Amino acid sequence: MDIKACIFDLDGVIVDTAKYHYLAWKELARGLGFDFTEKDNEQLKGVSRMRSLDILLEIGNKKTDEEMKLKYAESKNNKYLEYILKMTPDEILPGVISFLDEIRALHIQTALGSASKNAGTILNRVKLNKYFDVVVDGTKVNKAKPDPEVFIKAAVELNLLPEQCLVFEDAQAGIEAAINGGFKSIGVGSENILQNADLVIPGFEGITWKDVYEKLRITE
Ligand code: BG6
Ligand code: MG
């Protein structure tokens, strides 16, 4: 079946906010008296805020009640907001705009499928709203990736079937969500981490739709 739409994760695919999430979680961990490494952070990528906090607290071997968890999540988010409220369009990852321009010119629809409740703020900051026909973010979904809810909702809003959409993701949990929902997926990042994707690209720099599409067909 032909691909009619691309669904993009936001953090780590369109913009490099994965680093800001990491710095904000690391600061929370430091405040709680333990270290949180970049390797630990891989487990949090693509995962909702509250689930991320649970994983972080498990890593630090900390037990706490729901009230404190909400405080920790708020404190992390405030730190994260300090970073993202300073973002500019320069922080759109290399090659993203030309890839979006190319596929839109080919009449391939575009959607955002992000777990983040801050997705709207980020799109505004980097001025990318007009590039997406559909935006499904953390304010619209209840189930965190690897549940496919976010991508299924995007497909429904696009009026397409999962097999007509291609998902771009930088997180293991996101690739699993795509697979669980019956979507083809492109991993954006490291082959070692994203080996379950149909294809892995290091980023969008120098990548055209033809490259992606032809390589995908080879794997069919
Ligand atoms: C995902 C990020 O896009 O959004 C995760 O990869 C993050 O790291 C999740 O935890 C939720 O984001 P937010 O902005 O709602 O805390
Ligand atoms: Mg991501």
Image (cartoon, rainbow, N blue to C red):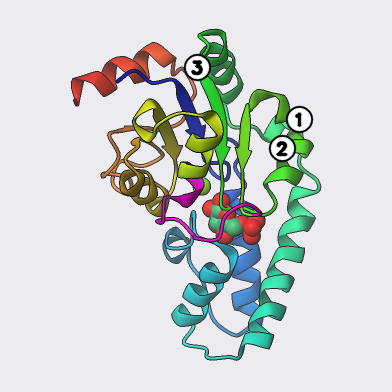
Residue 39 in which image quadrant: bottom left
Residue 101 in which image quadrant: top right
Measuring from the top left, give residue 152's x and y in whole percent.
46, 43
Q: Which tag, 1 or 3, sits closer to the chain's start?
A: 3
Quarter of the N terminus within the rendering: top left
Q: Amino acid at mark 2?
A: Leu
Q: Tell me how far mark 1 sits from mark 3, CA to CA.
A: 20 Å
Left or right of residue 167: residue 16 = right
Task: Report if the CB atoms under discs 2 and 1 are less than 8 Å apart.
Answer: yes
Label 3 CA crowd tier, 10 Å (few <14, some 14–19, many 20+): some
Residue 2 in which image quadrant: top left
Q: Is residue 82 visible?
A: yes
Q: Secondary structure at mark 3?
A: loop
Label 1 CA crowd tier, 10 Å (few <14, some 14–19, many 20+): few
**Residue under pointer 1:** 127
Q: Which tag, 3 or 2, sits closer to the chain's start?
A: 3
Which residue is nearer to you in this view: 81 or 115? 115
Q: Secondary structure at mark 2?
A: helix
Res 108 label: 3
Q: Which residues are magenta?
A: 139-151
Q: Main secondary structure of the magenta part?
A: loop
